[in-house]
């Protein structure tokens, strides 16, 4: 079988992958779907990394974007379990079919915790809906993630984080939930402090959560190269895990050209909700992000000893995952094919772009040209027949990126907003392997 990739991009500056709402619909395509982890549900619990309001407080915040495909009006109740102050958060939001509604969390209900218990946000309805979470660390740093409903949660996760100020938010959907985190710190030798004890690499941090409670495991104050990727998170009952970072500069390790550096004023935040190990896959297609000034990276996590076959153009190489349970691949020129002999998970990390330096090593470009992002890849085994997204329409500087991965024989049936996408008018790229 032959897979093709179509990458599209707006003419504005490339800053974010920002997927928000139901706009994009495929016609039904005949294919085998082995498993589906739904992103719609009636109950969501969410906790987010520290936004660290050291400046520009009025430009930071948490916004929920809700949408539904139901044909009747839907009411969503938003509460904040565990908040001890007054008044309690208790908001009702009405949704109409395919019309997104935003709700911004008042700042008094923010829970800024680096390590330890914190409260979560709960969204409930009698009818299924989808939830997107928008985080804004400043006017130039935003990120979104698609929340997974509690019915999609499982008991075990392998963490994937970025490599600066990593942060994990762990939430319980059940009472008396004992959670164990086998910590793995990659990069500098470090530890976290909780209840007077330091936990380092390969130590197990254990705590108990009640329903709706959350716990943060972060390294926010140290901006050195450090990651929590490969940490194993296990609950005695179902848990949800949100990965990301506290607001910081996401270091660009290698700039493409001489006299370029990561912008010193760039402050970024990223977040993504981790799928459980139950939704790992065996086959992935890696794409690049067009018109970015710097390449991103792919993070692949799996069991020690897992063998990966990576095919790009006419080159094939074998890679083994070691006892750290994670490997890194630089983004290739489109497109690569990854096959694994054991289930793995793959994440794409878009690093902030480099900026040019003058001969006196002063910054020439005064604004960071491209924000960071963390996004989980869907394995080929879980590809489906309908997808949706929405891009920002309020800020001119935000560019948008999308990539479609399709079997070549299915292109004639492909539709965007109910219009056919004809193969001949787009630059489709063939996937090797």
Image (tube, rainbow, N blue to C red):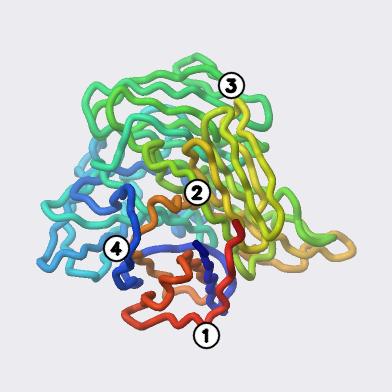
- Sequence-wise, the earlier of marks 1 and 4 is 4
- The quarter of the picture where residue 280 lies is top left
Extreme residue in the bottom direction: 425
Report which quarter residue 383 is drawn in: bottom left
Cα–Cα span, label 2 and label 4:
36 Å
Going from the N terminus, do you reach mark 3 or mark 1 first? 3
Secondary structure state at the residue bearing disc 4: strand
Estimate the spatial distance between the alpha carbons at disc 1 and disc 4, rounded to whole Å: 36 Å
Residue at x 58% of width, y 44% of height: 299
> Circle 3 sits on which residue?
201
Residue 248 is left or right of residue 380, and the answer is right
Say which residue appears at 41% left-offset and 50% top-offset. 381
Name the residue at the front extreme. 1
Distance CA(mark 1)–CA(mark 2): 28 Å
2 and 3 marks in contact (CB < 8 Å): no
Q: Residue furthest top?
A: 197
Checking the image for residue 425, the label placed there is: 1
Which one is in front in this view, the residue at disc 4 or the one at disc 3?
A: 3
| Mark 1 vs mark 4: in front | 1
Q: Is residue 84 at least partly visible in the picture?
A: no
Say if residue 63 shows up in the picture: yes
Would residue 294 be found to the left or right of residue 428 on screen?
right
Q: Quadrant of the C terminus?
A: bottom right
Q: Which residue is labeled 4 in the image?
A: 102
Q: Position of residue 423 (x, y in %)?
A: 49, 80
Q: Position of residue 347 (x, y in %)?
A: 52, 48
């Amino acid at each position: 079988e032959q897979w093709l990739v179509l990458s599209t991009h707006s003419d504005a500056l490339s800053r974010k992958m920002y997927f928000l709402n139901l706009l994009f619909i495929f016609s039904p395509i005949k294919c085998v779907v082995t498993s589906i982890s739904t992103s719609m549900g009636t109950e969501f619990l969410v906790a987010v990394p520290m936004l660290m309001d050291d400046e520009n407080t009025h430009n930071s915040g948490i916004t929920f974007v809700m949408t539904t495909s139901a044909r009747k009006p839907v009411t969503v109740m938003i509460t904040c379990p565990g908040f001890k102050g007054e008044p309690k958060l208790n908001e009702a939001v009405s949704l109409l079919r395919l019309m997104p509604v935003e709700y911004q969390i008042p700042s008094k209900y923010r829970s800024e915790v680096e390590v330890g218990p914190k409260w979560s946000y709960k969204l409930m309805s009698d009818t299924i809906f989808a939830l997107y979470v928008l985080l804004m660390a400043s006017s130039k740093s935003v990120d979104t993630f698609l929340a997974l409903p509690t019915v999609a949660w499982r008991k075990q996760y392998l963490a994937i984080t970025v490599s600066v100020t990593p942060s994990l938010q762990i939430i319980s959907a059940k009472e008396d939930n004992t959670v164990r985190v086998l910590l793995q710190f990659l990069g500098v030798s470090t530890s976290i402090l909780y209840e007077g004890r330091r936990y380092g690499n390969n130590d197990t941090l254990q705590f108990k959560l009640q329903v709706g409670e959350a716990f943060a495991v972060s390294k926010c104050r140290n901006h050195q190269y450090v990651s929590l990727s490969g940490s194993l998170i296990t609950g005695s009952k179902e848990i949800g895990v949100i990965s990301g970072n506290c607001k910081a500069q996401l270091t660009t390790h290698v700039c493409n050209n001489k006299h370029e550096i990561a912008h010193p004023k760039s402050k970024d935040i990223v977040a993504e909700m981790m799928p459980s190990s139950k939704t790992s896959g065996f086959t992935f297609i890696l794409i690049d992000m067009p018109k970015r000034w710097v390449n991103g990276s792919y993070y692949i996590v799996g069991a020690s000893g897992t063998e990966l076959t990576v095919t790009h153009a006419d080159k094939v190489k074998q890679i083994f995952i070691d006892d750290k349970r994670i490997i890194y691949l630089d983004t290739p020129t489109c497109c690569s094919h990854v096959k694994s002999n054991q289930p793995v998970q793959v994440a794409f990390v878009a690093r902030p772009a480099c900026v040019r330096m003058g001969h006196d090593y002063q910054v020439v470009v005064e604004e960071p040209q491209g924000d960071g992002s963390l996004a989980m890849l869907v394995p080929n085994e879980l590809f489906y027949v309908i997808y949706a997204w929405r891009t920002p329409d309020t800020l001119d500087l935000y560019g948008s990126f999308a990539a479609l991965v399709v079997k070549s024989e299915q292109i004639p049936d492909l539709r965007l907003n109910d219009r056919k996408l004809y193969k001949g008018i787009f630059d489709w790229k063939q996937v090797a392997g």
